[in-house]
Image: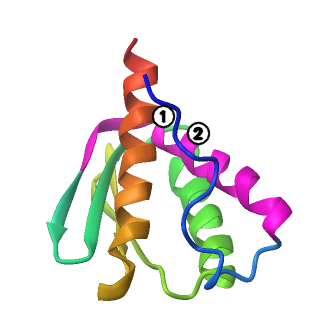
Amino acid sequence: MNALPIALPIEDFCTLPSAAQPMRLMEFVELFRRQVISPHRIGPHRLEFSFANDDGMYAQMSDLVARESACCSFFEFTIEGLDQDHLVLQVRVPANRDDILDALADHAIAAISEDTE
């Protein structure tokens, strides 16, 4: 398996200190390990992640995306409860930042793959 970079291509757009960015990415990777299916595109510049709604998942996800939105305002996050057992996280980026969405999807796919090995 090829190693993924420990950062996303956000250096020009993120106000989180560079030293903290790898830890934030690891928080997302930990979240992605709890996906129930691989992420998929739901439209131009939009990606959807699916999770079981258990053990404080909504609170954990809400906290993480709120902190990420504070430093990376180009991300648009939406959390929806499909039913009481499933949550969906939708991520949208501007048209010129699809590279970030692609990198996020790569990390999510790698995380779910690691968990099933």
Which residue in the structure is indicated by mark 2? 30
Residue 98 higher or lower than 103, as above or below: below
State the residue in front, 57 or 73. Answer: 73
Task: Characterize the local packing of mark 2: few (<14), some (14-19) or many (20 or more) Cα atoms within 10 angstroms.
Answer: some
State the residue in front, 79 or 110. Answer: 110
Is there CB contact under 8 Å for labels 2 and 1?
A: yes
Position of 90 compared to 104: left or right? left
Task: Characterize the local packing of mark 1: few (<14), some (14-19) or many (20 or more) Cα atoms within 10 angstroms.
Answer: many
Residue 42 higher or lower than 24, as above or below: below
The picture quadrant where one finds residue 85 is top left
Q: Quadrant of the C terminus?
A: top left
Residue 40: x %, y % from top left: 21, 53
Residue 34: x %, y % from top left: 46, 35
Q: Quadrant of the N terminus?
A: top left
Which residue in the structure is indicated by mark 1? 33
Q: Which residues are magenta?
A: 18-39
Position of 117 compared to 24: left or right? left
Residue 24: x %, y % from top left: 69, 57
State the residue in front, 7 or 77. Answer: 7
Residue 101 higher or lower than 106, as above or below: below
Residue situated furthest top in the rendering: 117
